């Protein structure tokens, strides 16, 4: 802007105005314009400096938040790992209990089958002994009813 203002002042000076008050008014107006431009540039420079400070504070806040989020993610990862390990442990425990149940069910079924077989053997044996007892009682009754004292050997 300064070269433009100098050029306008040089042009105005070369025009040989008869009224120097008009020339002074033009120079004053141009100086006011230059001062306004300089003030605006200073204000914008100050605003830029404040914006830089605000932006750096914002970046620092973002860094702090990022670090906190990182810590939260780390804690969540540790919790997730612990939960996954607990789930794996519980799945293993459940599978072991299911295998145990299957084994105990098979053992119980075998015991029930064995009990049924042994009950059948007992019943058959008892029935055979009962039948033989009846025959033995008949034989005893027959032996006791006959007098064998006259038989000589």
Image (cartoon, rainbow, N blue to C red):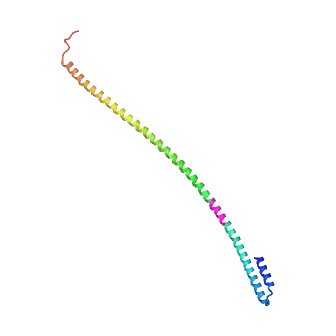
Magenta span includes 60:
yes
Residue occupying image coordinates x 23% and y 23%: 135
Assign the magenta stretch its main secondary structure: helix
Where residue 144 sits in the image (x, y, percent)? 20, 19
Residue occupying image coordinates x 56% and y 53%: 79
Position of the C terminus by quadrant: top left
Q: Is residue 25 above or below residue 44?
A: below
Where residue 123 sits in the image (x, y, percent)? 30, 30
Indicate the quadrant where residue 63 lies. bottom right
Camera-side residue of 59 and 84: 59
Residue occupying image coordinates x 46% and y 42%: 97
Magenta span includes 104:
no
Q: Which residues make up the magenta segment?
A: 57-66
Q: Is residue 77 above or below residue 25?
A: above
Where residue 94 sits in the image (x, y, percent)? 47, 44
Camera-side residue of 115 and 65: 65
Residue occupying image coordinates x 68% and y 70%: 51
Q: Residue furthest top?
A: 153
Where residue 147 sits in the image (x, y, percent)? 18, 16
**Count of marks overlaid on the render:** 0
Indicate the quadrant where residue 23 lies. bottom right
Position of the N terminus by quadrant: bottom right
């Amino acid at each position: 802007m300064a070269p433009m203002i100098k050029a306008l002042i040089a042009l105005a000076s070369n025009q040989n105005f008869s009224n120097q008050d008009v020339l002074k008014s033009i120079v004053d107006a141009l100086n006011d314009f230059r001062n306004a431009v300089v003030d605006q540039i200073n204000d914008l420079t100050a605003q830029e400096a404040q914006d830089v400070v605000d932006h750096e504070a914002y970046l620092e806040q973002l860094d702090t938040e990022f670090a906190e989020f990182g810590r939260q993610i780390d804690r969540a990862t540790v919790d997730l790992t612990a939960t996954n390990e607990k789930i794996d442990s519980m799945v293993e425990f459940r599978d072991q209990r299911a295998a145990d149940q299957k084994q105990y069910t098979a053992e119980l079924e075998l015991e029930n089958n064995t009990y049924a077989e042994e009950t059948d053997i007992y019943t058959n044996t008892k029935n055979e002994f009962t039948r033989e007892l009846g025959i033995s009682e008949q034989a005893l009754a027959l032996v006791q009813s006959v007098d064998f004292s006259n038989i000589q050997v």
